[in-house]
Amino acid sequence: MEMQEVHDNMFLPLPGLPPILITRTEGVYLYDSTGARFIDASGGPMAVTIGLGRKEVAEAAKKAVEEVSYILPIFASESRIELTKRIKKRLPPELNEVYFCSGGSEANEAAVKFARQYHVLAGRESRYKVMSRDLSYHGMTLLTLSIGDVKMRQRDFLPMLWRNPRVAPHYCYRCPFGKEYPKCDIDCALDLEKKILEEGPDTVAAFIVEPVVASAGGGLVPPPEYFPIVRETCDKYDVLLIVDEVVTGFGRTGRNMGMDHFGVIPDIATFAKGASSAYAPLAGMAVRGSLTDLFKEKSAEFQHLYTFSAHPLSCAVANEVQRIIDDEDLVARAARMGDYLGKKLRDLEELPMVGDVRGKGLLRSVEFVRDKASKEPLPKEKKVKMDIITTCLLKGVFFYPGYWEDEQGRGDHIMIAPPFIITEEQIDECVGVLQETVEEMQPMLLG
Ligand SMILES: Cc1ncc(COP(=O)(O)O)c(C=O)c1O
């Protein structure tokens, strides 16, 4: 196929990116129509876990279509029930009600609507605000864009977005309070209570957070004290704690769920990406049974249903993916490979342009700066992160962009989040290509 034909049939192709026709995927590799091979070092958008192109998943999909091709989500399919049981095994027993939909944005939208409807049923009609953090991402719909804080995604839609109360992030490398852990008082966690009081507790329905911030902040891991303080504050003011596990769920950080690192149980956990290793659109939320009980008592229906919710094909595919994760002990492997990746990336801290290396498990990030001592970002017009990503791609490794930017629109970090089946040799290749690229670019950028 001619590249012009590819270009002409893509809706608004990304400016600056040459048209690439991927014809085959296998393991951690993407192959294009010229035979070139790329390592998918970010698992797509931090989504692929078991590796690409697995025959067992293809067979599960074929069987699903032959047996139950579609049913309204008010009916059950065997694969849906099996998947629900597998997902519950990865979650704390309190989160024992699982609802399915098709994507992460939709799952977060569902969680917010559930929280609001729960408060209405509980006689707290005045509660509708959803608090969230600066440097977070929860999706692309207008509601989830409002809750998140990715400025470039929001810019053109600002008049259409909600006014949404925001809490400071745990961005320790650039602490919003100018403090340093562990000498700080975890002011970022205390900020939640301050903001709830400012808004009026009777108006706040929920607080939504990522356990480890993915691309909006670049692998931001909270200090151990953070989530216990947040949980206590939410309990004190009857605010539901929604944890967005869209990226972190199902092994990405080396534990079943991201929250497993912090010993805190949320009221709602949303998930997507890793649930099906991106083989099929499958997402959802797990909710405390104590909350759904109220719906049952009042015979209330949750007002959120899509044509493709709990689609039998997606459920069958995700069920097979979860079986593979169990049988091949891939969560433990993600922890092991994550440690190795973290160690290799930390070696890059020697480079003058590398300001910070952070993350957990196989969710890692590198932030680039103009000046290591002052942490001054690189000039916006240099478009450094996209240059790094494109150059690495041409050398055979794909990384994913991060979205942090300061008030002047400056900010460059990339995400490294490969499939869990990646080997040490493949990690060496990815980090080697990144190092070589940064070393080539540094003299021009730093002078
Ligand atoms: C933390 C987080 N939440 C939600 C989403 C939205 O998920 P989706 O793209 O499946 O709608 C993403 C997507 O990258 C994400 O990173």
Image (cartoon, rainbow, N blue to C red):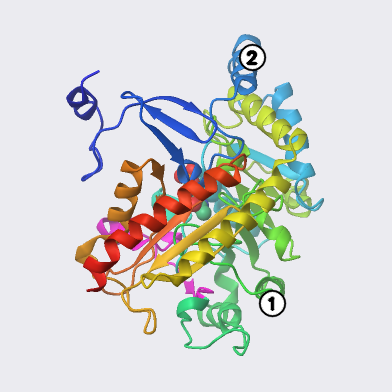
Q: Which residue is mark 2?
A: 68
* x then y, percent, for residue 173: 48, 77
Segment colored magenta: 146-171
Report the residue at 31% width, 24% height from top: 34
Q: Quadrant of the C terminus?
A: bottom left
Report the residue at 54% width, 25% height from top: 53
Taking the magenta stretch, the answer to whether it contains residue 59 is no
Q: Is disc 2 placed on a helix, strand or loop?
A: loop
Whichever of labels 2 and 1 marks the residue nearer the N terminus, that label is 2
Dot label at residue 225:
1
Q: Is mark 1 within 8 Å of ligand 1?
A: no
Q: Quadrant of the N terminus?
A: top left
Of the two numbered discs 2 and 1 in the rendering, the one whose residue sits closer to the viewer: 1
Foreground: 323 or 280?
A: 323
Report the residue at 21% width, 26% height from top: 3
Taking the magenta stretch, the answer to whether it contains residue 155 is yes
Up the image or down, 391 lies above or below 203; here it is above
* x then y, percent, for residue 115: 61, 56
Q: Left or right: where does residue 75 sit relative to residue 43?
A: right
**Quarter holding residue 420:** top right
Q: Amino acid at mark 2?
A: Val
Q: Is disc 1 placed on a helix, strand or loop?
A: loop
Mark 1 surroundings: few (<14), some (14-19) or many (≥20) residues within 10 A:
few
Up the image or down, 32 lies above or below 113; here it is above
Up the image or down, 359 lies above or below 338; here it is below
The residue furthest top is 66
* x then y, percent, for residue 398: 40, 44
